[in-house]
Image (cartoon, rainbow, N blue to C red):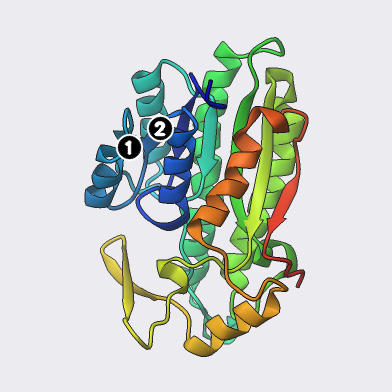
Amino acid sequence: MSSLEGKSALVTGAGRGIGEATARKLAACGARVLVNDLDADVAEAVAASIPGAVAFPADLTDPAAADAVVGAALEAFGGLDIVVNNAGYIWHSAIHNMSDEQWDAMLDIHASAQFRILRAYGRWLRQNASADSPTRKVVNISSTMGVHGGATQLAYSAGKAAVVGITKTLAKEWGRFNVTVNAVAFGAIETRLTSPYEREPNISVVKGQPRKVGLSLEQIEAAKQASPLGRMGTPEDAANSIYLMCAPESDWITGEVILASGGVRS
């Protein structure tokens, strides 16, 4: 039997990159997956390519979206065993150039959106879970910048640091429901958000506004050199790290922040 056979999972930000790879990994291991993404077209395309998957596009910065997304998963699967809070993006700026809009945007998607998803899930847990329930899993996606900080990444680092606090707190609150809550803090992963903007400018549309994303070739090379492995991670590397916290073998691990950074420690 596959390791996640009979389990159901919600993956946010699953239209591309880490989220898409995670949805595919969990499904390959037997889970039924709800694919959430801001972009309806990519969410539906990913779900259509995964047997048994369901798409539910939504902007998680909309305060009403979390209840709808969690509700859709519960309706589709009759329960929810795994929640992967992955949605997010990067908006670079040194503090002297940072606007209130940038600060609020980074905390909204990385901290508040996760809070709302978990609040909605927590309300269902209180009515449907106990210490005798099968183990359920929450995996919140953080970053090494949320642990160590990152130059020109104050707002992003603050949002990802909030994820660490959310994780450790809910691990203490939800143990009585037999729910493990862990975070995975990634280093540099090869996604649209870290692709070289000199070669092909990448635009992410958030709340109808275009946002340039990506790194310079110099930054990408520095990220590779910082790792003892000499490379950035792939979305599949990231998905495998998340899977470890979803698998039955991690049932005794909770409240932890797993650094998946290719050996980078600063």
**Residue sitting at the far top:** 132
Query: Which of the two residues, 167 or 192, is positioned nearer the viewer here?
Result: 192
Q: Position of residue 60 (x, y in %)?
A: 40, 47
Q: Which residue is mark 1?
A: 50
Residue at the spot x=43%, y=75% of the render? 195
Circle 1 residues within 10 Å: few <14, some 14–19, many ≥20: some
**Residue sitting at the far front:** 1
- Disc 1 + disc 2, Cβ < 8 Å: yes
Q: Is residue 41 visible?
A: yes
Q: Position of residue 233 (x, y in %)?
A: 57, 64
At label 1, the amino acid type is Ile
Residue at the spot x=58%, y=41% of the render? 243
Disc 1 to disc 2, C-alpha distance: 8 Å
Q: Position of residue 128 (x, y in %)?
A: 56, 12
Image quadrant for the C terminus?
A: bottom right
Q: Which residue is mark 2?
A: 33
Q: Secondary structure at mark 2?
A: strand
Please give the label number shown on residue 177: none
Q: Position of residue 145 (x, y in %)?
A: 66, 67
Residue at the spot x=55%, y=35% of the render? 118
Residue at the spot x=42%, y=57% of the render? 17
Quarter holding residue 46: top left
Query: Which label lies toward us, 1 or 2?
Result: 1
Q: Secondary structure at mark 1?
A: loop
Q: Is residue 55 above or below residue 226?
A: above
Q: Is residue 64 visible?
A: no
- The mark nearer the N terminus, 1 or 2, is 2
Query: Which of the two residues, 96 or 193, is positioned nearer the viewer here?
Result: 193
